[in-house]
Amino acid sequence: MSFYDPRQPAFETGLTDYDHTNRFILSYIWNLPRFTNQNGLIRNIVGGWDWTGIYTATTGDPLTILSGKDQSGTGLGADRADYVGPSANFGGAPSPADRTRCPATVKHCVPWLNTSWFAQPAPGTYGNAGKNTFRAPLFWNMDTGLLKNFYPIRGHERFNFQFRGELFNVFNHPQFADPNVTQSNSSNGSFGNIRSTAGVAAGNLGGSADSRIIQLALKMQF
């Protein structure tokens, strides 16, 4: 039975809040040339490195477009918006050309939804936007690293040093948070756009904790 309208049992049929339909992960380890026929300097400094990396791409979060007002009069405070846009554009992620531009006064903002496609439901109704029918931005990331083992004492391979250089978020791109999905926020211009990165307070877009990180380490093993 629907949480909103007992006459519409299918209204709550949709994707789960944690659904990520597609997830792609590519990891690799590449043993670079060891230059065994070169002199000791080249062999020990340039040769024998291992190049590692992992690439991840994941479908964005599912989005339910909310009214933001108690149009149904039920007091639940979770009415849906009415979708009034073209039927062919319902669901998924709108194309960049269809998205409503951010307010000119907001410095850090990414447009995501077309706000003209949504409206407040009529009084006494629940709105027609289905559960989790739209999508937030795709998440993708690339990490990589180089490592090399050094053996200072010939014939004693149990005693060695390992040097590692690692880069997280190699391309230093922001991982966008979900857009504002409350239609009543159209009055302040925040509905349908993104003003923060994942896990970062609004206003810090591009200067976030998901910026590129370079990490160097030296480990002794014996």
Image (tube, grey):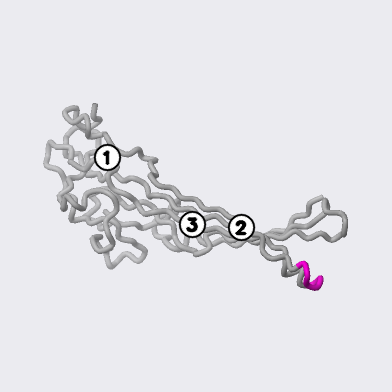
Quarter containing the N terminus: top left
Our reading of the magenta stretch's main secondary structure is: loop
**First-in-chain label (1 vs 3):** 1
Residue 131 is labelled as 1
Q: Position of residue 161 (x, y in %)?
A: 78, 57
Q: Cα distance, mark 3 to mark 2?
A: 14 Å
Compared across the picture, whether 43 is left or right of 97 comes to: right
Say which mark, if any, is on residue 43.
Answer: none
Which residue occupies 74% across, 57% down? Answer: 162
Where is mark 2, residue-wise? Answer: 52
Q: Which residue occupies 16% across, 53% down?
A: 86
In the rendering, which numbered label is found on residue 141? 3
Q: CA distance from mark 1 to mark 3?
A: 28 Å
Horizontal and vertical percent position of residue 150: 78, 60
> How far is mark 2 from mark 1, CA to CA?
40 Å
What is the span of residues highlighted in magenta in the rendered image?
36-41
Q: Please tell me how crowded label 1 is: few (under 14), some (14-19), or many (20+) other residues with Cα within 10 Å.
A: many
Question: Percent position (x, y) of residue 31?
Answer: 66, 60
Residue 40: x and y in percent read 81, 70
